[in-house]
Amino acid sequence: MRRREFLARSAVALGAGWLSSTNLLATVRTERLATGFRASDTVTLGNTGIKTSRLAMGTGTVGSGHQSHQTALGIKGLSDLLLNGYGHPHVAVALKHVERDKVTVLTKTWARDAVSARADLDRFRRELGTDYLDICLMHCLTEADWTERFKGVMDVLSEAKEKGIIRAHGCSCHSVEALRTAAKSPWVEVDLARINPAGAYMDAGPETVVPILREMKAKGKAVVGMKILGQGELRHRQDEAIKYALSLGLLDAFTIGAESKAEQEDLIHRIAAA
């Protein structure tokens, strides 16, 4: 597959990013019917109406302190890696080369109060050089009562959606209790869920998580998979892990963090082979 066919819509995220052209949609849909899954398949994220590609380029692999394996590549290195799919300041450089309406921007906030949430939304847009964000998630939720405890943040994101500052909101969870709450909350439109066949770095084992994701899917929530390769633990079982993610029938899209163009191209081919 040519690298310009990598993604059929695009997103850039603190934890995941999609970059690509939209003039391949008819070709991609035809290939999808004929040969199965493609990294460049156009998918719709739940009931949000937001269209993107099946595979996201994760930009937050083993990240902390505003750094990750991807940001360690440097501004030019990471922006080139993102643009390889088409053809934070790292993402801002890549965005300068792509029309904004052909890009879906997904990011996450650690905010736990309204003031911090508003500040993050302003900072994200300023740093990325964009007027709006497509998706903003509350990140790393662990509390079963997070919808009550952090309602202030939820209200800020709801207001931002009404004003057109974001198009959709949701969360990423780091405990099964928080995940169960997310499944039941009508506020959650997009969930970034940890899922792989080994249960590595997940909220619980697949036998527990999968039914919760099925509940989310049934309610029209977008489910985006992460930790598909278990933060590297499944690097020698990549084909198995990718086939598992695709076979669930629950993930609208998923993110995997490539650290080089070679890894990126390898993932594209593995998805096509799966």
Image (cartoon, helix red, strand yellow):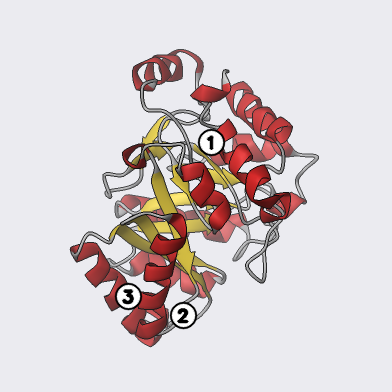
Q: Return the x and y of residue 55 as percentages of the image width and height.
A: 52, 38
Quadrant containing the N terminus is top right
Foreground of the two, 218 or 271: 271
- Res. 180 image quadrant: bottom left
Residue found farthest to the right:
236
Indicate left or right for 254 with 201 as reference.
Answer: left
Question: Is there CB contact under 8 Å for labels 3 and 1?
Answer: no
Indicate left or right for 162 with 5 as reference.
Answer: left
Q: Return the x and y of residue 183 as percentages of the image width and height.
A: 38, 64
Tell me what residue is drawn at x 58 percent, y 52 percent. 90
- Looking at the rendered structure, the kind of residue marked 1 is Ser
Residue 121 visible somewhere in the drawing: yes
Which residue is under mark 3?
154
- Looking at the rendered structure, the kind of residue marked 3 is Met
Which residue is under mark 1?
247
The Cα atoms of the two marked residues, 2 and 3, are separated by 15 Å
- Looking at the rendered structure, the kind of residue marked 2 is Ala
